[in-house]
Amino acid sequence: MEKFTAKLRDMQGTKFPIVKATFKGKDDQIHTGIMMVDTGSAKCILNRSVIPNLEDNAAIVDSKMTIHSIQGKVAECLGYLLSFRIGNRLFSETFYVNEDMDFGQIFNGPFIGIVGHEFLRKNKMVLDYETETLHESAGSFEGYPEDYKFIFPMFWGLKYYNAPVVDLVYGDKEYLMMVDSGTSDTVITKHLMDDAGICVGQLCGDGTITGFTNDTLETALYNVTLSILCLGKTPERPRLYIQNDEVQVISNCQYIIEGLKDAEGNALMPVSGMLSSEFMLRNKWVLDFATGVMYQR
């Protein structure tokens, strides 16, 4: 069988990983649009405008899910079965939709929905910012950690936070950031910036971020230094990947995600930010969901 591959569309313009997709709807009509690859979402999310085009039996009885926003809002979602084609492969997956979720204004062209990391893991895919493709994994990892500018495993974040995470280290202080290809700009809390002392300078203007539930948060723009832990470290001399990034800073919450516990009831470290698709594109990161490793050559 030919290996799966699909080109990411207009990466320099959108900064998001977008792929062309098609699906067959009512009366066997073929619909063409785009989907976003979102590593910050576990499930696949359907744009509400697609619903009228689906077959009448697409809804899945008793299939429900809730989405929680940064501001604590909750969106109830219903499940729909969608068969669709990306690149040279046909897939069938459950997508979730809320009547208030309309992403059409964010993207140019008909927007079908979002594919999350559970879909990427199940189908052994690689989100490759180096080649600007979504493709099938080779299934193995070559070389040593020291051969890469950056390398870090995803399994710990996926297990405990339901998303890939990276560990920021500044002296004896540590912070977590989610690796989120569905975020165009890196987002951190003001608490992280001030507590770690990582501000390089404030930029002109303010910004906003919009979540799944269409609620928005006001932000301020800063240039900061990110010091990200890599494999290949020793306890005495951690190996750090240091990059400056222009970020949106949230001041009305100390953490983006907090209060999580592991299976034994132990408190987990809170999440203080989201590393953006633009950052990964600029640094040509590769996220291999078959081997569970993300890296930069």
Image (cartoon, rainbow, N blue to C red):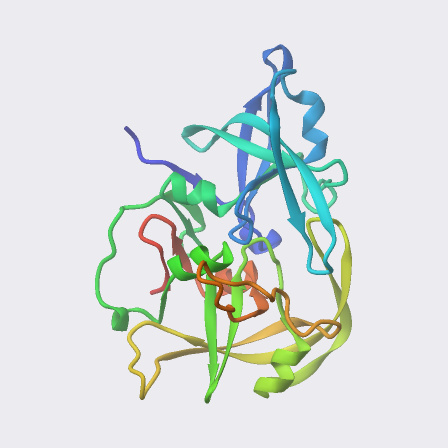
Identify which residue is drawn at 44% across, 39% down: 6
Q: Residue furthest front?
A: 264
> Where does residue 224 sit, x and y in percent of width and height?
59, 80
Q: Relative to 224, does residue 164 appear above or below in the rendering? A: above
Give left or right: position of 24 versus 88. Answer: right
Rendered image quadrant of residue 287:
bottom left
Identify which residue is drawn at 56% across, 24% down: 23
Total marks in image: 0
Give left or right: position of 23 versus 218. Answer: left
Rendered image quadrant of residue 70:
bottom right
> Where does residue 291 sit, x and y in percent of width and height?
31, 52
Looking at the rendered image, the quarter that the N terminus falls into is top left
Q: Relative to 40, does residue 176 appear above or below in the rendering? A: below
> Where does residue 181 sit, x and y in percent of width and height?
54, 55
Q: Closer to the camera, 80 or 267?
A: 267
Rendered image quadrant of residue 296:
bottom left
> Where does residue 217 sit, x and y in percent of width and height?
76, 63
Identify which residue is drawn at 54% across, 52% down: 11
Q: Relative to 57, does residue 251 appear above or below in the rendering? A: below
Identify which residue is drawn at 55% across, 54% down: 40
Looking at the rendered image, the quarter that the C terminus falls into is bottom left
Q: Relative to 247, does residue 22 appear above or below in the rendering? A: above
Q: Closer to the camera, 150 or 122?
A: 122
Q: Residue furthest left?
A: 143
Q: Which residue lies furthest to the top in this view?
A: 27
